[in-house]
Every structure is written in structure tokens, then in C-alpha cells.
Image: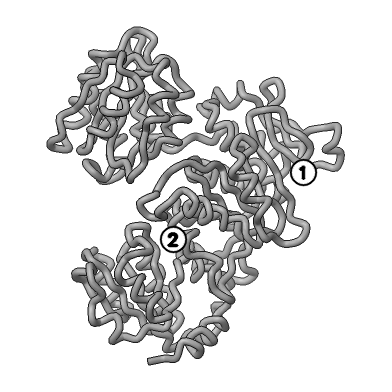
Amino acid sequence: MTPPTARRARLAGLTSWRSDWRGLRVVVLGLGAAAFSSADTLVELGADVLVVADSLHEERARLLDVIGARLFVGDLSEVPDVVPAFDPDVLIVTSGRYHPDHPVLLWAGETDVPVWGDIELAWRVRDKVEPAAEWICVTGTNGKTTTVELTATLLTAAGLRAAECGNIGVPVLDVVRDPQGFDVLVVELSSYQLHWVNSHSGGELVPFSSACLNLAQDHLDFHGSMAEYAADKARVYENTKVACIYNRADSATLRMVEEADVVEGARAIGFGLDSPGPSDFGVVDGILCDRAFLDDRATTALELTTIDELREAGLSAPHIVANVLAASALARSFGVAAGVIHEALQTFRLDPHRIERVAESRGVSWVDDSKATNPHAADASLRAFDPVVWVVGGLLKGVEIDDLVRAHARRLSGVVVIGVDQEPVLAAFRRHAPGIRVLAVTPGETDNVMPEAVRLAAQLAQDGDTVLLAPAAASMDQFADYGDRGARFARAVRDFLGR
């Protein structure tokens, strides 16, 4: 077996596409899109790659055979013999489904095999196309995807070659290897991905600018505690060169910036829905303003857009306005003009299943916010509407919704509970909102869930209500993903209304 000191010495020198990766033995854990991209990249670099997965994706398995990577598919409740026999130099993990206490990851720690995420690998080989793109990194419990899309849109509007990637769905390694090259990558980073960054010599991520949008309970089944979750989120700010964007309404994000080890000269830039101070972005009399990136920021501000203009574009919900401010701060840190931001925001539209108005009939609005997959996101969604018939429930991932129920009981006209594990949700309403009428969809076939939820919601809804799908939970207990959940809700609404 390779001595740990020799292994680490070699890995420390692998900091470029042009480093000598030949013969490096790498185990890639999983067979998702990012895992396949990692294996494909490493084979191209000349590494010896073994992919280890507990389920088969036939197309990716076929492609692994074509490119020359090995594949083991089987039970991973214990470390399969093929892994220690392979004697890997490094292990790559790309998915949150493999928790830090997974047997293969525990084995790596016990045998001193370094663990990288695909983000670290992508950072090490980011110079395949030169000059290497700068990275703008975005995390947060909620709003990441919208902020990443907005930031990339603003950068592109300024004539820059920008790509959105990472947790948003496009593996960073696919973008790094794109032969056209880019000026800047806007990288969405989940807490899973951040857990594995900035932990090895030679692989430390150095963002141009970075943002943590907010922090609330989520993914505690992976991180183990709120403190560990926050610590992993805070990694986004480490080594930032130009601007650390934080949320003035969320003191946890400010603490992250204050405690981060950044490049000398990097600035802390706050954003919020209140009036901005110097070095902040905010809102004054319905006008979104930049008081950070201008010479006379002590007494003047740059106008970016207005709440009225955002309303016309469907972007006026408070949490979306916050996303617009954060994205504008990131874009301004890269030199995008305020006038360019104003023009680009006129045509930007949110993705499906994000506070998407499905229909309106007889005074009742039907809104799909299936993307609200945790209580923090559902909280933001609920604040945008009043009164509400709330469709809630799903896979809670160890997170409680008591605070959410307590905070919004006054705005609820009724509740429809979906999901396989409904008792924690029903119990929260019994404790904190016993006077609200709560109906539950009997768990059963996926095809029946949303038609029944819509039928029950219609019984509860009155003129002026919004029926809001904001589940505060993940979807995988009954649906393929949040998009499938939202699409089924929208289809059920249209069918019920006869449209």
C-alpha cells in the first residue's frame, strides 16, 4: 500500500490540469451526474478510476465502460472488498446521499485516504482552458438557485462569458472542461459540497466573491447538528478575494464573514430589504440601491431598479427581492454597471415551481412553490401571501416545523397535509394552531396525491385566499423530485378547474 506521507505529498502537487495525474488511483463514490463527470475527468487526466455505487444507472455505466473506468455496483452497507484491494490514493464523493458516517467514508478516514469533493477536483483543474475563469460562489439554506441564475444573467448582460454550475444541476467539471472557456463561473454550493472543500493542501478554493444568503435548519441528518451545518456553510467565505456578501437580516451570515480568513482587502457587503448603509445594498422608498460599489458611498447611492418594476417581472416577493439584491452585489463586485443590471432585470423570470402562479378562479389563486423544500423556504413563501390555504408535508429530513406553524397560524384559512409521514406535521398544528381546519391526504399512489390535495384545498378555500403549495419538506417520499411534485400540483389544479 502507498504510505500516507507519499500519498499526500503527491496529491499536494496536483494543482493544475497540466500536473501529472497519470496512474493516480481514485475511487469515485456514487454514479450521479457529478460523480460521472468526476470519473470522466480523471480518466481524461490519465488516472486509474474505480466507481463504487449502490445502484445502477445504465447509461452512465455503459459510458464508464467506454471511457475505461471500472465499476462496482452492490451493497455498500459495508466496505466492499474491491475498495481496499484497489488501494486508492484519494476518494471522491459528490452526493449528499453519502453521509460522513457512511462505511466507505469512515474507512477512508481510518486508512488515511484523503476525501475530496468534485468541487475541489474542479478547482484543482480549473485551468484546462486558459486563462482560468474566476469563481463566484453562492450558498445559503434558500435562494441559492435563483441568486445564481440572476448573477449569471447580469454578468452575461454585461458581455461576460458566464456559466452557472454546481448544485444548480450542471457539474462544475463539465463547465471547466468546456473548450470555449469562460470569464467567470457562478457556482452554487450546497452544504454537502462545502463539507468537503478547503481541507487539503493545494486544493483550497479561492472565490473572487462569495455569498451566504441565509441560514436555517436543514440537512441535519447529514451534518448532525446546527453548529456543524453552519460551520460547513461558512466555508464559502474562506479565501475570498474581493467581496463577501452577507444578509443583514441574518446575523449568522455576518458572523461567518467576521470569522472568515479572507484575502487582504476583501470587503464585507451587506444586503437587506431595509435602508442600506455605506458598503450595503438595500431598499429606499421602493428603490433598490447600491451604496457599496461607488466612489461617494457615504452620501450617494446608485439606483438599480424599483419594486414596481420587479412586480411587473414577477420578482416582488420579499425573499426574491433579497435574492435580486444579493445577485446585484455579486455582479457589481465583478464590475457590472448599474444600468446593465436595471435592463437585465426587466426580462429575467423565475424558474418553474418557485412561487409560480398556476391559476386564478372565483377569487382563489393557486400558487406552486414546490421548491420550498424546507421550513425556511416555506416561511419566505408564506410571508408573500395572506390569507393562505397551505399545502404542506413530505420528507422532513429531521427538521421540525413547529416554529413555522406558530409564526403563520394567523394567516392560514386552512391546511392540507401531504406526505407519507404526516404525524409530525399534524402534531405541530394540534399544538400551535388547534383552531385551524386541517385535512390530510391519505398516503397512497403518487398519481392520486395531488388531485386529492387540490380537491381538499378547494373545500377550504374562500374568495381572496391563495392555495399555496409550499411543502417545507423534500419530495422524495412520494415524488421523483420537487419539480415532479410541482408539475403534478399544477396539472391537478388545471384538471380540477377544467382548463
Q: Is the C terminus in the top left, top right, bottom left or bottom right quadrant?
A: top left
Marks 1/2: CA–CA distance: 31 Å
Identify residue for label 2. 171
- In the image, what residue occupies the spot 72% across and 38% down? 280
Note whether 143 is above or below 125 in the view shown.
above
Q: Is residue 482 found left or right of 184 in the rendered image?
A: left
- In the image, what residue occupies the spot 47% across and 56% down? 166
In the image, what residue type sits under mark 2?
A: Pro
Note whether 408 is above or below 120 in the view shown.
above
347, 400: nearer the viewer? 400
Q: Is residue 441 found left or right of 398 in the rendered image?
A: left
SS label for mark 1: loop
Q: Is residue 222 found left or right of 455 in the rendered image?
A: right
Relative image position of residue 183 (x, y in whole percent): 63, 60
451, 53: nearer the viewer? 53
SS label for mark 2: loop
